[in-house]
Image (tube, rainbow, N blue to C red):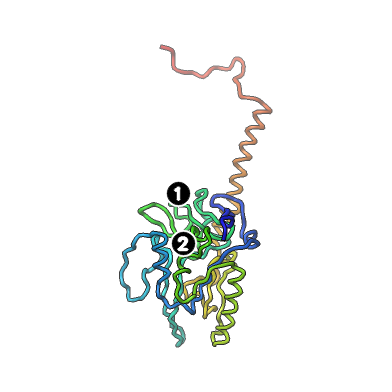
Amino acid sequence: MTADGLEIRQSSASVWGSATELRNLKVVSKLIDTTTCIGCKACEVACQEWNDLHIVPTTQTGTYQTMPSLDANYWNLIKFREVEESGFFAWLLRKDGCMHCADPGCLKACPAPGAIVQYQNGIVDVNPEACIGCKMCETGCPFDIPRYSAKTDKMAKCTLCVDRVQVGLEPACVKACPTGCLEFGDKAELVAVAKARVEQLKQNGFTQAALYDPPGVGGTTVITVLAHGDHPEWYGLPKDPQVPVAVSLWKNVARPLAALAIAGSFFAMVAHYLSFGPKTPKEGAEKPKGDKPA
């Protein structure tokens, strides 16, 4: 990985860039194989240490899960889910965190210029210095990932260890995983690995195994192998995630029209000035009354 991969593709509060163009570029990916995760939480610890995140107080709720959900100071969480349906029971584990969508709803919804950026390699990053804490990114994310910190008045999420990736290292969570259920590399190559794993699972009796890489958000940089691919909701994943319509309209229609309206008003004023000149009072017109001189 070179620094060239960190050139910005899209930026919040802008109208340039598209998921279609991004899919034609070489992007990185993190593969999560939920079938080989043992819930050891090494990835959680590595994430906290590398990103120097503060300790988050929590309570024991009768589960192995560290936190009830993600937090502004907890970007990576192993979710433990018990599923019981029609006599079927399964205990499922899944690493929860930012999916780094090719068509990121958080970026589309954000009104602060440069607060959320998408690099050429597919990573979606947050710039705290530009963040205004408006929480609009929460409304744009179909995976419920961004978290607000009342202490800093900023939003936060997984950055896919972009600082490590920039210098050729893999994300801290991938480095720490002892079972190999996390892999990092070129997306095209990891998709091939994931599909081979899905076929292996089908041969072993998991006939509905599938790769989770939802097209509704243009695909995701973080892809996931599910043994029960016909039920992603069992893992806490939406079946068909989409960027909210209101957010898409704001990004693709309302914002460009507003920019055009402002530009049109400016050029209309310039044209009027050039055609008619500055406004001057007519001869004999009564002058406006002002304060009388002392």
Using the rendered view, name the quadrant where residue 122 is placed.
Answer: bottom right
Q: Position of residue 246 (x, y in %)?
A: 54, 57
Q: Where is residue 35 in the image (x, y as percent from the top left)?
A: 49, 79
> Viewer-proximal residue, 140 or 68?
68
Picture layout, residue 251 above or below residue 97: above
Identify the residue under disc 1: 129
> Viewer-proximal residue, 95 or 286?
95
- Amino acid at dot 1: Glu
On residue 158, the disc is 2
Q: Where is residue 56 in the image (x, y as percent from the top left)?
A: 34, 63
> Viewed as shown, does residue 102 lie left or right of 64?
right
Tell me the element at label 2.
Answer: loop
| Residue shown at the point (33%, 62%) measured from the top left | 55
Tell me the element at label 1.
Answer: loop
Q: Where is residue 52 in the image (x, y as percent from the top left)?
A: 39, 59
Q: In which quarter of the image is the N terminus?
A: bottom right
- Amino acid at dot 2: Cys
Label whose residue precedes the other's in the sequence (1 or 2): 1
Distance (Cα) linking label 1 and label 2: 16 Å
Q: Quadrant of the C terminus?
A: top left
Using the rendered view, name the quadrant where residue 25 is placed.
Answer: bottom right
Picture layout, residue 133 above or below residue 194: above
On residue 91, the disc is none
> Viewed as shown, does residue 226 lie left or right of 74?
right
The furthest residue to the right: 275
The furthest residue to the top: 294
